[in-house]
Amino acid sequence: MIVTGGASGIGTETTAALATAGASVVIAARRTDAAEAVARNLRARTANPNIQVRPLDLSDLGSVTRFLDDWEGPLHTLVNNAGIMALPELQRTSEGWEMQFATNFLGHFALALGLRRSLALANGARVVSVSSSGNLFGPVFWDDPHFRFMPYDPLLAYAQSKTACTLLSVGITERWDDDGISSNALNPGAIATNLQRHTGGLRTPEHLRKTPEEGAATTVLLAASPLVEGTGGRYFENCAEAPVVESRPESRLEGVAGYALDRANAERLWDVSLRLLEPGR
């Protein structure tokens, strides 16, 4: 199994739970020195020596390509966990892509595409997309996903990227079912981690917060549990399928927006993303 961002926050607890269950886990991380230290601790904690670290910067397509070039053999689960949130200033990749959309979604899209053959070899593989209740704050901005015309808004950019993550699971399930590959998305809940460093910390009331272990639970369910075998194209929270909501809840943010599970939107996003990844674009 691969867990992107598996050396921090809920990614660490996801890695720990999967390794405890006996999986061989590759932590794909940008800062490999820090990730190696986490991996050493997790090997001791889980009594599983099969926890590795490999370098991956999702905002750099060259890094994604190098990761893919080094991968061999079947892959049972890809957990698209890594992410960034609410960058206060507009940042772009070398391609000119808005950084949150590029890191949270496009990098994972390219990674999944490159691993399709390995996932197919597993005969029943899963791709897990860690989304967010942020999907309730905005759809994909089809005409201006990289904020070249719209004024940049940190939370709208984050919302778009997390809606895209959910649509990725819909697209994978629709397109790769014949390869035995299914995919679901999830909201881990409100967990205080480094993810909120640009927002002044977690704002959710304390009684609604989760621990990192609790936050990882839904990811682990989708990554490994027989309870969801064959299930795909859905959105989960609190270890259960979430309801589709017609408008954003005013109090507790729960559920998934209909546009984030729409098959036509998933198809459109897939085509847009393929064009973006074409060399020279």
Image (spheres, rainbow, N blue to C red):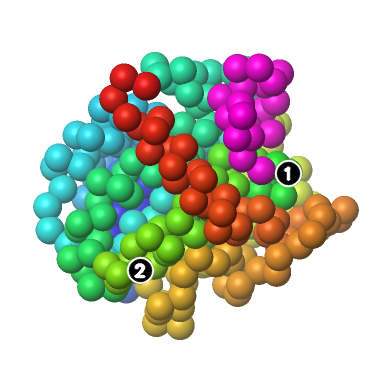
Which quadrant of the view contains residue 60?
A: top left
**Label 2 sits on residue:** 177
Question: Picture coordinates of residue 133 (x, y %)?
Answer: 67, 52
**Residue at left 53%, top 18%?**
91
Q: Nearer the viewer, mark 1 or mark 2?
A: 2
For disc 1, the neighbor class at 10 Å (few under 14, some 14 to 19, many from 20) is some
- Find the residue positioned furthest to the bottom: 227
What is the spatial separation of the Cα atoms under label 1 and label 2, in whole angstroms?
30 Å
Nearer to me, 57 or 193: 57
Q: Is residue 171 visible?
A: yes
**Label 1 sits on residue:** 137
For disc 2, the neighbor class at 10 Å (few under 14, some 14 to 19, many from 20) is some
**Residue at left 39%, top 33%?**
275
Label 2: element kind? helix
| Amino acid under disc 1 | Phe
Report the side of 134 relative to 161 (left or right): right
Nearer to me, 274 or 105: 274
Label 1: element kind? helix
In the image, the segment drawn in magenta is: 139-158
| Amino acid under disc 2 | Asp
Q: Is residue 202 visible?
A: no
* Prevailing SS of the magenta stretch: loop
**In the rendered image of this protein, does residue 59 appear above or below residue 171?**
above
Task: Indicate which disc residue 253 carries.
Answer: none
Question: Picture coordinates of residue 263 (x, y %)?
Answer: 55, 58
**In the rendered image of this protein, does residue 222 appear above or below residue 3?**
below
**Residue at left 63%, top 34%?**
141
Label whose residue precedes the other's in the sequence (1 or 2): 1
Q: Is there a contact, CB below 8 Å, between mark 1 and mark 2?
A: no
